[in-house]
Image (spheres, rainbow, N blue to C red):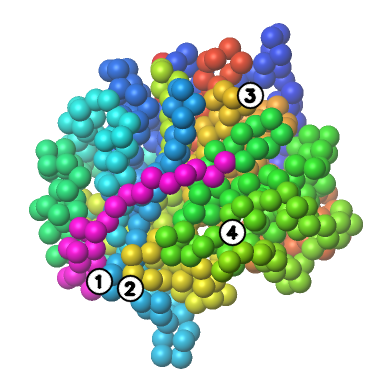
Amino acid sequence: MKKIIILLSVLSLGCKTQNNMVQPTGLVANAAMVVSAREEASKIGVEIMRRGGNAFDAMVATELALAVAYPFAGNIGGGGFMVYRKANGEIGSLDYREKAPLAATKDMFLDENGNVIKGKSTESPLAIGIPGTVAGVFAVHEKLGSLPIEEILKPVIELAERGVVVTKKQENRLNDYRDKIIKVNGDKTLFATAFKENDIIKYPALAATLKRISKNGRDEFYKGETAKILVNYLQEKGAIITLEDLDKYEAKWRTPLIFDYKDLKVISMAPPSSGGICLAQIFKMAEPFDLAKMGHNSTEAIQVIVEAERRAYADRSYFLGDPDFVKTPLKELTSDDYLKQRMSNFSFEKATLSSEMKEGKVMYNESTETTHYSIVDQFGNAVSSTTTLNDGYGSKYYCDELGFFLNNEMDDFSSKPGEPNLFGLVGNEANSIAPQKRMLSSMTPTIVEKNGKLFMVVGSPGGSTIITSVLQTILNVYEYSLSMQDAVNAPRFHHQWLPDLITFEPNTFDTTTFETLKSKGYLINEKTNPVIGKVDAILVLPNKKLEGGADFRGDDKAVGF
Ligand code: GLY
């Protein structure tokens, strides 16, 4: 099996058609496409574009359809980020990340001795941040949408009423999480039922919530009947979110983080996501090396990428947080001089040890479980959105009356400097908890231009592995001439400074690669994280058609016309 996968990857390298185009292996569409975690959501996004809607209308539809079809991570009880590029080249990004409630405190997850209380930031009602998704989709619609909101929400509401077929992977996920869901919601909750593959789950409560939102708009969720039901539910469970918290929530337009890699222009998310800045640092540190010549997933290429990742994640842990609260030295962290100096102690002979390497010196004044979708419309607009509840099914708190799960995003704050979160990421003062602050994210919705034209729309779930999955997918297409689908399918690896391990997708890499890396002092982890990222991407082919890359690791699907 191992050999077959490696062979397939190698065979598809450089497989070009007569007009020097890499042979696509994913779905090819002429004009418009959505790639998302569920076929039902991709279809609804495409249906909206067929009716004349643009990528932004499709974004609203796809985001909300995922809340129905993919409750594992799709949501209206969580938040996310969206990066866009209009057909005329105009770019922008929206932050609809959750915020800490007004009553949140820096030490809320610590005991009287200052130690982190296990599970409090992930599985208690205090783990829930103020949801941003509904504010996000309405902000997008108001600024960039074209169809009436009722028309966009209609197929989503119909899907919730009609129900969604359970896939095998979904059955397995629900089995894995059922006990935890029952523990916090009781055995009358919707997901207490042991749903099996091919069962149909109907969501009448969510349909009713979406109907009210369709009729009354954004404020229904933040001030209306839905807000009141939600706050009653949360307070009954012991959460600290109030009506005032919901009322104060705003999604925020932010300047995207932009950098060049060779002749690519990469447009990604700035803080409070660490995605764009880490991606920029890793690409820039790797740029002086000839990765293509080293070979796809060769030991040397793995070393370069891992050492760049190590350094970027060390900086992430120290410097990054919500820019509304802490000053982040973005320019300094991405400057050529700084990054050159940062890689100056790298050697192909021996691994740099994370224990001997901390954040760099910068002069300035001061699950894995998320979901991504990519959209290109028939007008040439592109949307890259990543949205999350944090862990699978978030905090597991499911408001049966409203029909959705609540996030456990508070765990993305640093509960205590140096203490790892759910993803093993350690943070510092910059990402400490404060009322109304947004927790640092790894979500990396990204759009890539080549020669000034739209080239790729890409992103992934996967907590801390999001950034490295996006990085490798872009490199797979650009440096290694893989088709979009092959680039998404290719085996991935990941390093995040601490713990000092290279995690490989199990059974996909050669044992000789491992032996060589071990001899140079690298620690190999092939056991945990069976999946690194789950990328959904779209590539604009030289003939202007679109190739989808829908990750085979999930039920992901590209749909287009
Ligand atoms: N909750 C995962 C992230 O935002 O990075």
> Residue at the location (51% across, 49% down)?
270
Give the residue pinned by disc 4: 329
Report whether 223 appears left or right of 27: left
Q: Which residues are magenta?
A: 235-258
Give the residue pinned by disc 1: 240
Separation of residues labelled 4 and 2 (CA atoms): 26 Å
The CB of the residue at mark 1 lies under 8 Å from ligand 1 = no
Name the amino acid type tagged 2: Ala
> Residue at the location (54% across, 60% down)?
328
Name the amino acid type tagged 1: Ile
Whether residues under marks 4 and 1 lie with C-beta atoms below 8 angstroms apart, the answer is no
Of badges 2 and 1, the one in the foreground is 2
Of badges 3 and 1, the one in the foreground is 3
Give the residue pinned by disc 3: 451
Image quarter where the N terminus lies is top right
Residue 467 in the image: state x and y as whole percent.
Answer: 58, 49
